[in-house]
Image (cartoon, rainbow, N blue to C red):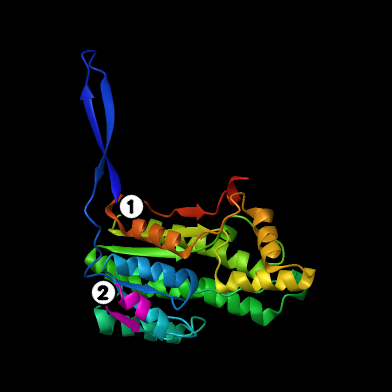
Amino acid sequence: MVSFAFFAHFSRSSRPVFIFQARKDHHMSLKGKTALVTGSTSGIGLGIAIELARQGAHIVMNGFGDVDAPRRQIEACGVQTAYHGADMSKPAEIEAMMAFAAEKFGGVDILVNNAGIQHVSPIESFPTERWDAIIAINLSSAFHTTRLAIPHMKQKNWGRIINIASVHGLVASRDKSAYVAAKHGIVGLTKVTALELATTGVTANAICPGWVLTPLVQKQIDARAAAEKISTEQATRELLGEKEPSLQFTTPEQLGAMAVFFCSAAAANVRGQAWANDGGWTAQ
């Protein structure tokens, strides 16, 4: 990791001359820390869990589907893992997961709220049960994990709450009313959390990715290809071209590196921010 030292010396005119000097830091260590990453059996969550594990953090996994393969990927980094299959739409199961993390590792030092689902439909035909599920999993679950993680973090006077919002936490798109509402809510929750913890060693920030090639996004590409009778490659180009000037997907590894940065000493006073990693989407 390269960081920058900042020096000032005074010239003969007594005016300060500022000098930036790059230096190599030692490998950042999160050894002894425990990270809980919701929705970490695939996609963005798994990418973040792996990057945190590479820094030495033990990982509490959560999510559906295959657990063994992603668990092996994380444990290959030389850390311990534990898995809890809490349904993130159910507060009681979230409470059980947080108690499980405390029993296994003594508490959660790094909380990454990543679990999310999606449904695309115009508002007038949006299924009410899908609205309720998206708000519960994409927004309310982060409130429940946060409220339960804060006491341990405050006691240690160190903690990192990292909410995976979306570019849709900053801007909107058609036919995604529940998702956009939830992600805007996550950004607001992040700001309130940061303000309430501003005088402590606990920070809260949000990461706002643009298009990331996850199973969730692949489904949208496949649906577009089928609906328009075009190739998957063309559907991908069209998807990126509509919104993302870089014409590149953000990767789970890049988002993991951002999460690691938020855990570093350099980010100790970064509070309540919604950082876009969106290929220029919100710069337009």
Instruction: Give the secondary structure at mark 2.
Output: loop
Q: Which residues are magenta?
A: 72-82
Left or right: residue 165 compared with residue 36:
right
Disc 1 marks a residue whose amino acid type is: Ala
Camera-side residue of 165 and 234: 234
Give me the disc on residue 267.
1
Instruction: Reply above or below: 197 against 46.
Output: above
Give me the disc on residue 140.
none
Residue 241 coordinates in the image, percent (x, y): 67, 54
Q: Nearer the viewer, mark 2 or mark 1?
A: 2
Residue 198 coordinates in the image, percent (x, y): 34, 55
Q: Is 74 a magenta residue?
A: yes
- Judging by the rendered image, the residue that carries numbered circle 2 is 78
Q: Is 73 a magenta residue?
A: yes
The residue positioned 24% from the left and 78% from the top of the image is 106
Q: Quadrant of residue 263?
A: bottom left
Instruction: Reply above or below: 1 against 255.
Output: above
